[in-house]
Image (cartoon, rainbow, N blue to C red):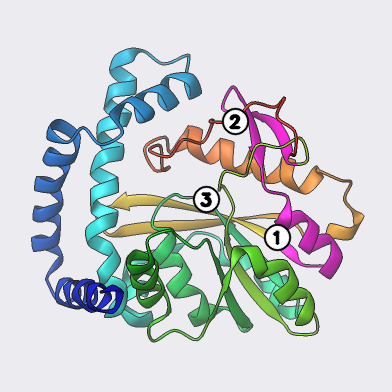
Amino acid sequence: MKRIGFYLVKWWADFQSIQPYWWLYLKSDVLCLLTYHVARYRRKVVRQNLLRSFPEKEVNEIKAIEKHFYHNLCDLFVEAPKMLKMGAEGFGKRITYANPEVLEPLFAQKKSIFYAIPHSGNWEWFGKMIPSFAPHHNVAVYKKVKNPVFNALMLYLRMKDIDAEPVEADSAFRHLVMHRDRWNAVLMIADQTPHGLSSDYWTEFLHQDTCWFTGMERIAKKLDYAIVFVAMSRQGRGRYEVRYELITDEPKATEEGQIMERYVRCMERFIQANPDNWLWSHRRWKHQRNQVAA
């Protein structure tokens, strides 16, 4: 049954990938009406997240951000299958780079790099684009989802016709240590929610006490990886701009927690400037600092 389910959703994705953008965005508009007004998908979670993150904003401003977020979310859904057919040329027409020169010294030094991107813009499209400009062995770190059919579909969308190696998040540290002599470019979606333990990195983020995975910092310090924050913002439907910010190219010279703090501040500034671009529908603040490991 799992195999049948996968082939059904694969057929759906292949069919969606050949449809014109105008038709996909028309479907997105309908989907947004159903998601926001009928199903009311995670409306309470989104509203609560926005109110707590932007206490200085009026309710009408919060509602405007909320509605834009749902439009963006539905656009992301219909854009995902397009990854199968776009290729480097197609992505090149839809993603612009504001400051690609940030990467040039790292390439010249043959420095392994973490591309740290939050759930903003269209992070899936950026991941597909990396092999076209990064002269590395490309690694895509992903978090396995519980539904095996959906997990298989996302791997299919992400890895088809791309020169990159998928690595599950739980084994990323071990995998990169095993291949420490390789020149790697690692894509990491670095705003996932950890277990909320005292061993996680805790800091204030958007006016709230927030915990973070520390794996990226630990790996970077051990293997001497540069870390680049990827700020990907929506410029229009199917149009995105990427701006890079170097967090560090000397991780071993940083103090414990310094890399994570820099990353969090980069992300906070980006969200404050582009509030409807981030994924507000996940329960990012479900843990309290006083939890401890069992």
Marking on residue 227 = 1
Is residue 10 positioned above or below 283 on the image? below
Between marks 1 and 2 in the image, the one whose residue lies nearer the viewer: 2
Residue on which disc 3 sits? 118
Position of residue 42 measured from the top left corner of the image (x, y, whole percent)? 31, 34
Query: In this view of the protein, which residue sits in the foreground, 180 or 250?
Result: 180
Identify which amino acid the numbered label 3 is placed on.
Pro
Is residue 237 positioned above or below 275 on the image? below
Identify which amino acid the numbered label 1 is placed on.
Ile
Estimate how packed mark 2 is, as few (under 14), some (14 to 19) or many (20 or more) residues with alpha carbons within 10 Å. some
Instruction: Measure how far apart labels 2 and 3 are at the Cα level.
Output: 19 Å
Side (left or right) of 12 relative to 149: left
Position of residue 45 measured from the top left corner of the image (x, y, whole percent)? 37, 29
Is residue 205 positioned above or below 161 on the image? above
* N-terminal-most mark, 1 or 2: 1
Assess whether residue 268 is covered by the magenta stretch: no
Q: Secondary structure at mark 1?
A: strand
Marking on residue 31 = none
State how many labels appear: 3
In which quadrant will I find the N terminus? bottom left
Q: Which quadrant of the structure image shows residue 12? A: bottom left
Between marks 1 and 3 in the image, the one whose residue lies nearer the viewer: 3
Query: In this view of the protein, which residue sits in the foreground, 131 or 239?
Result: 131
- Residue drawn 75% across and 80% down? 110
* N-terminal-most mark, 2 or 3: 3
